[in-house]
Each structure stands twice: as C-alpha cells, then as structure tokens.
Amino acid sequence: MKLGAFSISLSVKDIVKSRDFYVKLGFQEFGGDISQNWLILKNGASIIGLFQGMFEHNILTFNPGWDQEAKTLAAFDDIREIQDRYLAQGIELSSTVEKNSKGPGSFTLVDPDGNDILFDQHV
C-alpha cells in the first residue's frame, strides 16, 4: 500500500518563532501562508508543517497521490482504497471520506498511544 508523502504537522504557539527555529535547523519554506498561520518547511525529504491555532495536537500526515515534492504521482492508492483496507482490518477511524466520492478527501485515525494520523489526498 502506498501512503504518499509523509510529514508531521506541528501545533505551534507562535508560528514566527517556530519558523525561525526550524530555519536555524536547516529547513526552508516550501509552502503555506504565514498570514493564515500555516507554513510547510522542508529539508531534503523531511517535511514539517507548522500550524498555529488550527488543532490541539501534533499530527502525523500522509498525502496519497503526492511525492515528497508535493507533485502528483502517476499511479497511487486512492484514499478510499486505503480507508477500505483499514476498515476491513478492523481499524477504527475518527473520521471518514465519502466512499462514493472522487478526487480530494481525507480521513483520520488515532494510534494506540493517542497520536492523531491524517490521510489527506489533494488530487
């Protein structure tokens, strides 16, 4: 199963301080809009999303259909296929994507330690 690009989405208190900190660690701005309180930073294949005031906890994020450059893959496992596989295995989902929909969609689940995991397809 191909889950697509991976990143961690961090819930930050001060996006400017967080951006400056991660830039010092070697990350560069890759996307987002700081005026809307979100940025995507990248260092090689490592991607960090900074989100101020958007959610409570840090989130592991997978983007089916994208590579680590946020470019659409020619072939990928659709989010609905991934969701169906998890449901068939008895994995409980916190939110689901409409089964009969097409294109972008998302679903979430929580791992045994309480970590939120977002599957967010943009294509």
Image (cartoon, rainbow, N blue to C red):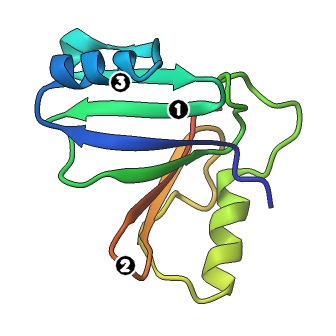
Q: Residue at x 44, y 62 (%)?
A: 108
**Which comes before the other along the chain, label 3 or label 1?**
3
Give whichever of discs 2 and 1 has the lower sequence position.
1
Residue 43 x %, y %? 56, 23
Q: Which residue is mark 2?
A: 113
- Any mark on residue 47, and which? 1
Please identify the quarter of the rendering in which residue 1 is found.
bottom right
Q: Which percent across, then down, holds residue 2?
A: 78, 53
Question: Considering only vertical position in the picture, is 118 above or below 63?
Answer: below
Q: Give, as a three-letter code, the residue at label 2.
A: Asp
The crowding category of the residue bearing disc 1, from other C-alpha atoms within 10 Å (few below 14, some 14 to 19, many at least 20), is many
Lateral position of residue 32 relative to residue 35, left or right: right
Distance between mark 3 and mark 1 Cα atoms: 11 Å
Marks 2 and 1 sit apart, C-alpha to C-alpha, by 22 Å
**Which tag, 2 or 3, sits closer to the chain's start?**
3
Rate crowding at label 3 as few (under 14), some (14 to 19) or many (20 or more) other CA atoms within 10 Å.
Answer: some
Q: Are marks 3 and 1 in contact (CB under 8 Å)?
A: no
